[in-house]
Image: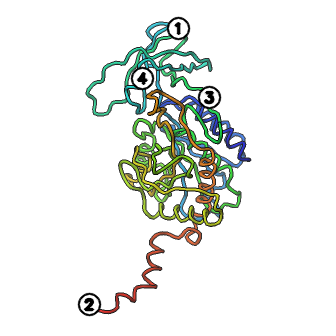
């Protein structure tokens, strides 16, 4: 596939309505793509997480630990809870957005038949003392009668994704740009790739990475899996949009596997040495917590790659209003490129030597410095 096709996927996915627990439209997009790929196999676990792998994966010729590229299929959005009348409904917001962004903000109802209707948030229900609050309840009014039902997804009223001057402006980059990068990288893998590479697309990340926890606690992934978790993370001055994808060494909660992070960083360094146009960053990114922290807690080997994101969770801090999320398309292209090389190289200790190997080499060459007693 061409980069142009991957950009089409990027725009389609980042325009797709989705919410924690209601990721069916993204899952349907993925299923349509897999049907077009005779060599791919799609499976769903009992929690609704999706796994894509090559039909020959795990057979003769595949070596090393399985590599999982993971991304989540949801984005902060509303789910209808109660229909009061044909112009008024209550919805629950599933995700993290500051309260000041809600009142008076236009929203878009996505009905099951594909129709949409525009409304406005008129009021918020008071919060309750809940140690694990799922989300704020809002009342929405519509100027014309609408057909709504409990379980319908409602999003902020943001135009479909478009690319302008090298920037993607979209309703939901986090983490649908991650899903797009995952499938684009998988589509770009050569058939001769010697390693068992799989995609894991999870659910309900925005409410506490619930899909990832379910997969990890039920041991639905091989114990020796290497997990590369993809994210779109809030950009800061020291992690700017346009400076390349980010090897994320940690998040607000934890730091990630040092060996896997080191190996991916070395792969990125070699890419940049061979091609000076390739740009990448290595940052902590403490703006939020990602699924890598969850997988690490359950004993898996995990790290994160992310895209620097503008208007994180649609919050435009300059205007104080809801707006499109933004990423650099060049960052996305380099993101895909890095993922492809990681998938080819990570399972090979020669192509991607680990941190301990490097330390042992240092000791072999410089251990003589310790020979003289003090």
Q: Which mark is residue 143?
A: 1
For the point 28% across and 92% down, the residue is: 373
CA separation, marks 1 and 4? 18 Å
CA separation, marks 3 and 4? 20 Å
> Alpha-carbon neighbours of circle 2 within 10 Å: few (<14), some, or many (≥20)?
few
CA separation, marks 1 and 3? 22 Å
**Where residue 310 appears, x then y in whole percent?**
51, 39
N-terminal of the two: label 2 or label 4? 4
N-terminal of the two: label 2 or label 1? 1
Which residue is at the front of the view, 247 or 356?
Answer: 247
CA separation, marks 2 and 3? 69 Å
N-terminal of the two: label 2 or label 3? 3
**Where residue 21 appears, x then y in whole percent?**
47, 31
N-terminal of the two: label 1 or label 4? 4
Residue occupied by mark 3: 160
Which residue is at the front of the view, 268 or 87?
Answer: 268
**Where residue 356 appears, x then y in whole percent?**
44, 72
Q: Which mark is residue 374?
A: 2
- Say which element carries label 1: loop
**Where residue 6 appears, x then y in whole percent?**
68, 43
């Amino acid at each position: 596939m061409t980069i142009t096709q991957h950009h089409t996927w990027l725009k389609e996915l980042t325009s797709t309505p989705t919410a924690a627990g209601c990721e069916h439209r993204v899952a349907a997009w993925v299923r349509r793509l897999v049907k077009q790929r005779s060599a791919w196999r799609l499976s769903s676990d009992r929690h609704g997480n999706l796994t894509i792998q090559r039909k020959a994966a795990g057979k003769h010729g595949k070596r090393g630990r399985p590599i999982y590229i993971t991304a989540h299929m949801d984005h902060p959005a509303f789910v209808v809870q109660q229909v009061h009348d044909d112009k008024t409904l209550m919805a629950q917001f599933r995700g993290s957005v500051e309260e000041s962004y809600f009142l008076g903000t236009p929203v878009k109802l996505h009905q099951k038949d594909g129709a949409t209707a525009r409304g406005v948030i008129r009021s918020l229900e008071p919060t309750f003392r809940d140690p694990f609050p799922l989300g704020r309840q809002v009342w929405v009014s519509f100027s014309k009668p609408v057909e709504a039902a409990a379980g319908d997804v409602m999003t902020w009223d943001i135009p479909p994704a478009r690319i302008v001057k090298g920037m993607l402006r979209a309703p939901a980059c986090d983490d649908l740009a991650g899903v797009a990068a995952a499938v684009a990288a998988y589509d770009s893998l050569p058939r001769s790739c010697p390693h068992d590479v799989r995609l894991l697309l999870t659910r309900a990340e925005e409410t506490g990475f619930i899909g990832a926890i379910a997969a990890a606690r039920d041991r639905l992934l091989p114990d020796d899996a290497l997990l590369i978790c993809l994210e779109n993370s809030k950009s800061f001055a020291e992690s700017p949009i346009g400076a390349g994808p980010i090897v994320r060494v940690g998040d607000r909660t934890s730091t990630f596997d040092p060996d896997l992070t080191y190996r991916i960083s070395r792969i990125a360094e070699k890419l940049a040495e061979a091609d000076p146009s390739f740009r990448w960053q290595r940052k902590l990114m403490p703006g939020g917590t990602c699924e890598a922290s969850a997988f690490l807690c359950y004993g898996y080997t995990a790290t994160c790659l992310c895209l620097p994101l503008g208007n994180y969770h649609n919050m435009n801090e300059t205007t104080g209003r809801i707006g499109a999320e933004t990423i650099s398309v060049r960052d996305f292209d380099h993101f895909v490129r890095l993922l492809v090389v990681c998938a080819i190289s990570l399972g090979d200790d020669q192509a991607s030597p680990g941190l301990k190997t490097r330390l042992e080499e240092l000791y072999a060459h410089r251990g003589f410095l310790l020979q003289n007693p003090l």
